[in-house]
Structure formats: structure tokens, C-alpha cells
């Protein structure tokens, strides 16, 4: 792709509001360019949804204008979880779905991401076609061909019913006391309604968005608030989403946090028990080794993709899998929907609790987390060290010492001039020692490479 991906990252276009490319004029051009591409493929209708950021109103208007200029009609959803937009794109037979959100980032950031007509994220070729038009001045269609904008009044209700249908009729949450943290984000209307309509007693926090407080001290990025409230309310379980609702983490009745790896284990175990497991589970390079070992005991394999839910989905489709995700709480249940969905993933865990009659703490106990040490090593711009012989030798020595019950991963950051050094194994002291030694070697070789360049 190279030069073609000037704006699109792994999850659409994202940045700080008011700084290129997250400006109203660019977003208008993005809407026009996307509209032109979609119109050429027969898609004359898009759905547009957003999270609760104040800047979402501005970008919603800019996108609507861009699509209208390209002759594409907009169906406006208002605040809606990202996976809800994917679902409504399919059911409203739109050519694409557009999400205005920066996910777990603070309110000062925002972004635009797209779903195709099938509810999956756009493929690289379509993104490239959109980017190819972005430097052109928008050309309006004839005044009689301009797009229109229509508000979808029942969007929330449609998505609530879809979520409820993601569990069986026998899944009754009556008697379950739960805390739900909506991060002052896009799930603030939908999530409490879904759990209450299934019978749970729901205590809600993080459900008072004011445009500026999204993800502030609430949600999956700040789960301490959830864990504390679960204990204070003597709840059976807690659920926390991120700002756009595609991530989820949970807390058991003891206030202990269960991350995406633990939730994947619980869902996979329930699938195996019901004879519904299909294909390997897909994680990432950062998925805890404890999950891989626990899945092996269930008779399931673990495939590792690059970090990012886009790559998890890509790998799931390649290996014909149904379940995948990341430690951060991006969980994809392809037997239920087309993208990561925090509410639907949480429902799979709640269903496992109800059908087994066991608390979350017991369901996750079969997976033992391996100690993991992550060290970020700053690298001077332009310095590459992964092919360095000394570093390769140090990695090989560390892997030999860890044996088959450990891992070493050196991974460049996709957003910062850093090399992430990760070591995982059964002994915490050994893991920490090896990670620090490798980080020191990386620093030494980076300094030597810098001197050689002068």
C-alpha cells in the first residue's frame, strides 16, 4: 500500500480535533470521496453514527454535506455504539456505514471509520480508492441529484433487539445484580436497556455524557471504578465498555478485573461445552501465553495475528474461525456479528454464568496468566535494530532459557518511535530479568547504530 495510505490507519482516520486531517474541511472531502467511490459501486445510501464527543456534531454535518455533494443519501443514527452501526448498515441495506469516534481516546481526539455494506470493515482496495480522490476539489452532482439526510428514529431500539437475540431464549438474567460502566460513551442508552430487558438488576455508572467526559476515569480504560463499585454494591459481576462500545472488560464478584484474554477463555469454554466450537481461536502477538495453554487443554488451537482487531478479523476469516480478540477487550464473535461488539461479548459471558450456574471467578479459574513484562525502548528516528546480529543472539538466548513455556517478542510501535520488548514465562523474576537485559541490549545497539550513522 505504501504511499496510498496517507490518511487511513488500521482503524480509519484518527487524530486530534482541529489538526490535520481531523478538520471539518477534510472530513467534508472524505465524505465526498467515499460517496464517489460508493456511488460508482451502486451504493447511494450510507448510515452515519457517532459516539458522545462534542466534536461529533461538527463532523456529522461535514460528512453529511460531503455525501450529499456526491449524490449519496445519509441515514443519521445519532449516538450509537460502533458495532451497532455495523449492524444497521446491513439491515438498512446501506452501501456503507460511517462511525465518528476515536474509541477509547479522550474527547479532544476524533476519527472516521467505515464499514462496507456487509458490516465488515472496508477492505484495503476500497480505502485506497477513497484516498486517491482526497486531494481533489469536490465536484457536485446536479442539483436534482444531491443526496438527502434522514434521521433514523428507531435505531437504538433496533440494536437493542439485535443484542438480545445474541443469546438463547433460555438465558434469563433475573437474579443477577450487575454494575455497568458506559464510559460516558456510545453505550450509555443501549447497554443498560439490554441487560435490564433480559432481567438483570443493573447499577449504571458512566452514563452521563456531556460531550467532554467520554472515557474520563470511567470505562474499560479505567476499570478501577468498576471494580470498586462491584464491591460496594455486592454485585455478582461488572461490565465496562470503552467510548464507542467495541471493547469490554469485566469484574468478578470479588472486584477482580477480567481482561479480554480471560473473557475469550470463558466464551471458548462455553462453546466447547455446548459443542459449538469451530476452528481455532485467534489472538494477537500480545495475547497471554496462559490463554494458549488453557485453550490447548480444551482441544483448541490459538492463532496469533498482528496487534489490532482488524488483523484479528482478517485471520479469523483466513482460518475459518469464529472467536477471536485482544487483551484490551476487543472480542469478535463471528457466529453472532461481523465486528468486535462489547455488549454481545459481555452477553456471551453472562450466558455462560447463567447456564452453568457458576460465578465468573470460577469460570475463569481454568486459565492461569503467565507473568508478562513489557519494556518500551525509545529509538532514534530512522534507526532499525531488529536485524542486528547481537540482538538476534540475545533473543535466541532468552528463548532457550525460557524453553517451551515462555515467549519473547520485539515489536516496533505503530505510533511512537519505540521498540516494545515483551518477555513472558512462568517465573516472574526470570521474566523481568530477561526483559530488562534485552531492553539494555536494544539500547546499546541503538546507540551504536546512531554513532555509526554520524
Image (cartoon, rainbow, N blue to C red):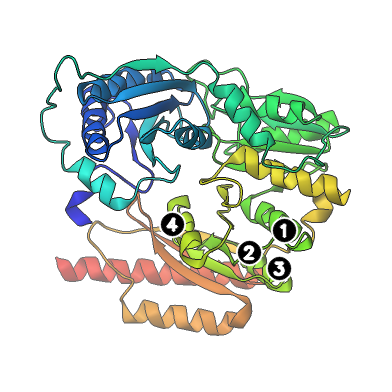
Q: Which mark is residue 278?
A: 2
Q: Residues within 10 Å of mark 4 (few under 14, many from 20)?
A: some
Q: Which residue is mark 1?
A: 271
Q: Which residue is mark 3?
A: 294
Give the distance between the C-alpha atoms of the residues marked 4 and 3, in whole angstroms: 22 Å
**For the residues carrying marks 1 and 3, which lies nearer the camera in this image?**
1
Q: Position of residue 110 (x, y in %)?
A: 38, 30
Q: Which residue is mark 4?
A: 311
Q: Is residue 291 above or below residue 73?
A: below
Give the distance between the C-alpha atoms of the residues marked 4 and 2, in whole angstroms: 19 Å
Tell me if I can see residue 247 in this picture.
yes
Under circle 1, the secondary element is helix
- Please tell me which of labels 2 and 1 falls first in the chain: 1
Under circle 4, the secondary element is helix
Q: Quadrant of residue 232?
A: top right
- Please tell me which of labels 3 and 2 falls first in the chain: 2
Residue at left offset 51%, top offset 72%: 408
75 left or right of 320?
left
271 left or right of 94?
right
Q: Position of residue 152 (x, y in %)?
A: 47, 18
Q: Quadrant of the C terminus?
A: bottom left
Amino acid at each position: 500500500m505504501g504511499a496510498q495510505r496517507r490518511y487511513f490507519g488500521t482503524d480509519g482516520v484518527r487524530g486530534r480535533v482541529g489538526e490535520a486531517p481531523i478538520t471539518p474541511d477534510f472530513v467534508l472531502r472524505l465524505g465526498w470521496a467515499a460517496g464517489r467511490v460508493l456511488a460508482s459501486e451502486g451504493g447511494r445510501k450510507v448510515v452515519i453514527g457517532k459516539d458522545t464527543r462534542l466534536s461529533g456534531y461538527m463532523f456529522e454535518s461535514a460528512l453529511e454535506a460531503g455525501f450529499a455533494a456526491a449524490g449519496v443519501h445519509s441515514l443519521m443514527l445519532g449516538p450509537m455504539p460502533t458495532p451497532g452501526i455495523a449492524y444497521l448498515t446491513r439491515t438498512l441495506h446501506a452501501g456503507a456505514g460511517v462511525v465518528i469516534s476515536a474509541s477509547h481516546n479522550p474527547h479532544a481526539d476524533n476519527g472516521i471509520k467505515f464499514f462496507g455494506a456487509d458490516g465488515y470493515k472496508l477492505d484495503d482496495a476500497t480505502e485506497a480508492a477513497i484516498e486517491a480522490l482526497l486531494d481533489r476539489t469536490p465536484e457536485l452532482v446536479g442539483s436534482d441529484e444531491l443526496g438527502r439526510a434522514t434521521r433514523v428514529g428507531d435505531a437504538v431500539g433496533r440494536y437493542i433487539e439485535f443484542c438480545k437475540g445474541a443469546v438463547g431464549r433460555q438465558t434469563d438474567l433475573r437474579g443477577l445484580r450487575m454494575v455497568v460502566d458506559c464510559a460516558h460513551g456510545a453505550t450509555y442508552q443501549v447497554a443498560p436497556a439490554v441487560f435490564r430487558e433480559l432481567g438483570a438488576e443493573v447499577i449504571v455508572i458512566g452514563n452521563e455524557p456531556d460531550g467532554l467526559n467520554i472515557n474520563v476515569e470511567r470505562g474499560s480504560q479505567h476499570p478501577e471504578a468498576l471494580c470498586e463499585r462491584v464491591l460496594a454494591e455486592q454485585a455478582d459481576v461488572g461490565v465496562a465498555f470503552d467510548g464507542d462500545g467495541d471493547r469490554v472488560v469485566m469484574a468478578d464478584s470479588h472486584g477482580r478485573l477480567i481482561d479480554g484474554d480471560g473473557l475469550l477463555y470463558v466464551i471458548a469454554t462455553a462453546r466447547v461445552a455446548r459443542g459449538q466450537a469451530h476452528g481455532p481461536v485467534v489472538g494477537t502477538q500480545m495475547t497471554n501465553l496462559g490463554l494458549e495453554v488453557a485453550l490447548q487443554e480444551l482441544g483448541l488451537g490459538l492463532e496469533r495475528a498482528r496487534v489490532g482487531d482488524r488483523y484479528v478479523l482478517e485471520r479469523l476469516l483466513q482460518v475459518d474461525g469464529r472467536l477471536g480478540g485482544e487483551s484490551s477487550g476487543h472480542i469478535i464473535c463471528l457466529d453472532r456479528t461481523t465486528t468486535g461488539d462489547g455488549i454481545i461479548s459481555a452477553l456471551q459471558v453472562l450466558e455462560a454464568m447463567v447456564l452453568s450456574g457458576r460465578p465468573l471467578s470460577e469460570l475463569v479459574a481454568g486459565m492461569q496468566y503467565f507473568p508478562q513484562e513489557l519494556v518500551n525502548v525509545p529509538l532514534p528516528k530512522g534507526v532499525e535494530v531488529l536485524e542486528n546480529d547481537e540482538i538476534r543472539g540475545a533473543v535466541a538466548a532468552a528463548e532457550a532459557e525460557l524453553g517451551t513455556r515462555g515467549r519473547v517478542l520485539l515489536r516496533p510501535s505503530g505510533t511512537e518511535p519505540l521498540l516494545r520488548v515483551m518477555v513472558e514465562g512462568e517465573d516472574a523474576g526470570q521474566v523481568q530479568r530477561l526483559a530488562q537485559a534485552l531492553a539494555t541490549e536494544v539500547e546499546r545497539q541503538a546507540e551504536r547504530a546512531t554513532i555509526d550513522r554520524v
